[in-house]
Image (cartoon, helix red, strand yellow):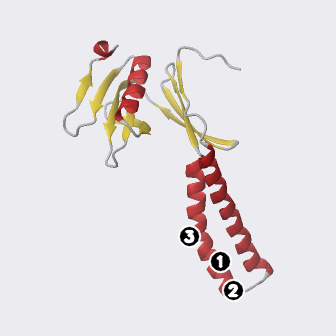
Amino acid sequence: MEEKTENEISIFVGKRAWYELLLASVFFGAFIYMILLFVYFAFIEVSVKIAIRAFVVFLLCGTYCLVYGFKFSATKNMLVNLKTNTIISRYIVGPFSYDVKLKATEFEYVSFFEDRYGEFGTKLWYVKNRHYEMYSFEDKESAFQFSLNLSNKLNIDLLDATEKGNFKWVEKEKIQ
């Protein structure tokens, strides 16, 4: 196993709850069932009218099942490499993973904010006005703690943007 250096910050979400995985398996199972129904009506019992209906149902309901299957089973892990200023997001669904790499020149500050749905998010800002939205949380305290830890590890400033139009820089010395 590779030893982590102080130039890397790893953020792991953890595993999904058992009921989320159960729901994901139901949605993936329904998706596979719809594929089999379409294949049956299109190639085995050849009926153009029924095959077209099965295809339309597959497109509508199958897409729904596939998206919600991914929603309930996917996790997102992040790695921030300070040496190369790279943010790597790893999306994981079961044994499969997909990496998205973002190259930033210099990290400027971390902000936490409230979105229009009442959730709190964290953004990592770099190069003037560019940002990377990291995670969202249900409560303000979790978003604040995550943002504070990240800003401390990156040694950059922290911005409280939870009130629209009233942004405040957080003085980290007073908190610690």
Separation of marks 3 and 2 at Cα, in angstroms: 18 Å
Name the residue located 28 percent from the left edge and 13 percent from the top edge: 174
Q: Which amino acid is tagged 3?
A: Leu
- Residue 56's place in the image compared with 25, above or below, is below
Q: Which amino acid is tagged 1?
A: Ala
Question: Dot 3: what SS?
Answer: helix
Quick one: label 3 or label 1, which is nearer the N terminus? Answer: 1
Q: Position of residue 59 (x, y in %)?
A: 59, 70
Q: Residue 4 is drawn in which quadrant? A: top right
Q: Position of residue 101 (x, y in %)?
A: 53, 35
Which quadrant is home to the C terminus? top left
Instruction: Name the residue tied to disc 3.
Output: 60
**In the orientation shown, which residue stands out farthest toward the front?**
19
Question: Dot 1: what SS?
Answer: helix
Question: Dot 2: what SS?
Answer: helix
Asked whether the viewer can see residue 124, the reply is: no
Quick one: label 2 or label 1, which is nearer the N terminus? Answer: 2
Which one is in front, 165 or 13? 13
Q: Which amino acid is tagged 2?
A: Val
- Position of 92 with respect to 157 (left or right) is right
Name the residue located 59 percent from the left edge and 61 percent from the top edge: 65
Asked whether the viewer can see residue 79, the reply is: yes
Instruction: Name the residue tied to disc 2.
Output: 48
Which one is in front, 139 or 97? 139
The dot on residue 54 is 1
